[in-house]
Amino acid sequence: MAKKVVATLKKEATGKSITKVIKMVKSPKTGAYQFKEETVFNDDIKDFFAKK
């Protein structure tokens, strides 16, 4: 399951908001789950969760 942190972290001079997103990814080697964290622009959130 993927989880999005709702709080906005920072506003830049361009007016774009940045959000910290956390995605759970299954490791192909061990089968264990790992968490991938990234800060992305609000416009790119769907792209972050769509890519593998």
Image: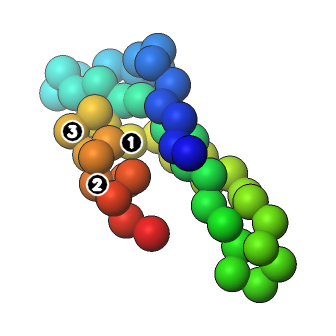
Task: Name the residue at 37% across, 65% down.
Answer: 51
Q: Position of residue 28 (x, y in %)?
A: 69, 81
Q: Nearer the viewer, mark 2 or mark 1?
A: 2
The residue carrying mark 1 is 40
Camera-nearest residue between 39 and 36: 36
Categorize mark 2 by other alpha carbons within 10 Å: few (<14), some (14-19), many (20+). few
Q: Secondary structure at mark 2?
A: helix
The 10 Å Cα crowd at callout 3, few under 14, some 14 to 19, many 20 or more, is few
Q: Please name the residue shown 47% across and 15% down the image.
A: 7
Residue under circle 3?
43
| Rendered-image quadrant of the N terminus | top right
- Amino acid type indicated by mark 2: Asp
Circle 2 residue: 47
Question: Given contact means CB atoms under 8 Å apart, are the residues at marks 1 and 3 in contact?
Answer: no
Q: Which mark lies nearer to you, 3 or 2?
A: 2
Identity, as a three-letter code, of the amino acid under mark 3? Asp
**SS at circle 1:** strand
Q: Residue at x 38, y 42 (%)?
A: 40
At x 68% / y 51%, what residue is drawn? 35
Residue lying at the far left in this picture: please name it: 14
- The answer to whether residue 27 is left or right of residue 41 is right
User: Identity of the amino acid at label 1?
Assistant: Val
Q: Nearer the viewer, residue 22 or 14?
A: 22
Q: State whether residue 49 is above or below residue 3.
A: below
Label 3's element? helix
- How far apart in space, not on screen, are marks 1 and 3 (Cα)? 8 Å
How many marks can you see?
3
Q: Position of residue 32 (x, y in %)?
A: 80, 66
Check contact, mark 2 vs mark 1: CB within 8 A.
yes
Query: Going from the N terminus, do you reach mark 2 or mark 1 first?
Result: 1
> In the rendered image, which quarter contains the C terminus?
bottom left
Position of residue 36 in the picture relative to residue 11 (left or right): right
